[in-house]
Amino acid sequence: MTGGGIRGPAGMRIVSLFIAALLLAAGSLGLGAVSAQTGQRATALDARLAGDANRTRIVIDLNRKIEVRSYTIANPNRVVIELPEVSFDLPVGAGKQARGLVSAFRYGQFAQGKGRIVIDLREPARIDKTFVLAAIDDQPARLVIDLVRTDAASFLKGALVPEPAKTAALRPQVKPQGSDTRPLIVIDPGHGGPDSGAQAKTGDEEKEVVLDVGKRLRDQLLKTNRYRVVMTRDDDYYVPLDERVAIARTNNAALFISIHADSLSKGAGEASGATIYTLSERASDSDAQKLADKENDSDKFAGYLARQPDDIANILFDLAQRNTKNHSALFARTLVGSIKGAARLHKSPLRSAGFVVLKSPDVPSVLLELGYLSSPDDLKQMTSETWREKVSATVVVAIEKFFADRAPAIAGR
Ligand SMILES: [Zn+2]
């Protein structure tokens, strides 16, 4: 069986209901609701920013009118526009340019049937208006968001504040497979939806690379007939970090593999090759720490009301158990051994840091960075189907070896 639909929209739906309840409770948020028009799938065609640091307008051209909702989230300060399912057919680089109150914006599928635009603010801003204009003459339909500068205190008053996660009862679960005691592997392609992860100069995005490798890995694993597989996501939508962990734990996974691809910013030196990370309280090196910080910000990028980072840090290491850590380390070493020869490894390929997705106390977990999208050589590999197939095969080899060595202890978990 595959992970298709396992994650299920249920969790997200309830999170949305939760957000909706917050919205109802916050009448002063300036919500914009616009009547829906069903029919052809909505498509965003173009986007532009206008105005200055006192008043900034974002305009998204659409093929038809849609219903939208908007609200602000603090820390970091963002504006979130909730949309129905929308295809984003925006020009390359859309949202990357800062202007006025806006430093950047991202967009994508947030959950099945839901789109989202997340606007990063340079200064505290209030949503003055959100509206959608119907097409007229040669003008397409347009979504317009008007932002007005405000002070920090007023911003906080109007913004939604992250709440402690309350998803314990909502975790997606695979139906018990009767007597099927084959080890269950959770494959976690990083990012998704509005959070595209790292990006290459060519426009290639981490979220796409890791999803494709994740699916190939799933298919190859299923072919062995020795494993059950669940994917945290099998399409271009966002799954909060806590939920990824919950999917592994609730399904009693025998192994959790998060797949990513890093990128170094300009001036940060050069690096290439694959790296395997495990969880540790103290990062193995400062680059590992920086990477973990970046990956842990995923929820923020996606505009998800994430738990406060402090809460995550507090529970992170209390929970991690030595036994699980040992198994994680063993699998990481096995994976390095198996990737070697088939793909290039980073010069120090085994590293560790406080990655939120690796915090399951009872599921051996590793995070595989396939390589660096900032390295032309790595990029060439990562965009090659042959390489993706080959690197997936090396992960299967490592999994086979891991379970062969540990069969009596772990199989049947
Ligand atoms: Zn990543």
Image (spheres, helix red, strand yellow):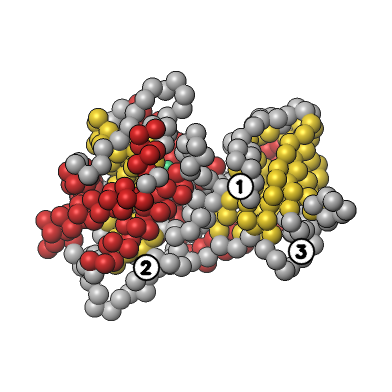
Where does the image place residue 305, in percent across and percent down from the top left? 57, 48
Which residue is pictured at 70% across the width and 66% down the height? 40
| Mark toward the start of the polypeptide (1 vs 2) | 2
Where does the image place residue 226, in percent across and percent down from the top left? 22, 67
Mark 3 crowdedness (10 Å alpha carbons): few <14, some 14-19, many ≥20? few
* Residue corresponding to mark 3: 36
Give above or below for 284 relative to 46: above
Which residue is pictured at 26% across the width and 67% down the height? 223
Q: Nearer the viewer, residue 168 or 2?
A: 2
* Residue corresponding to mark 2: 2
Q: Nearer the viewer, residue 137 or 120?
A: 137
* Residue corresponding to mark 1: 107
| Mark toward the start of the polypeptide (1 vs 3) | 3
Q: CA distance from mark 1 to mark 3?
A: 20 Å
The amino acid on which the numbered mark 2 sits, given as a three-letter code, is Thr
Which residue is pictured at 51% across the width and 44% down the height? 196
Q: Is residue 217 left or right of residue 293?
A: left
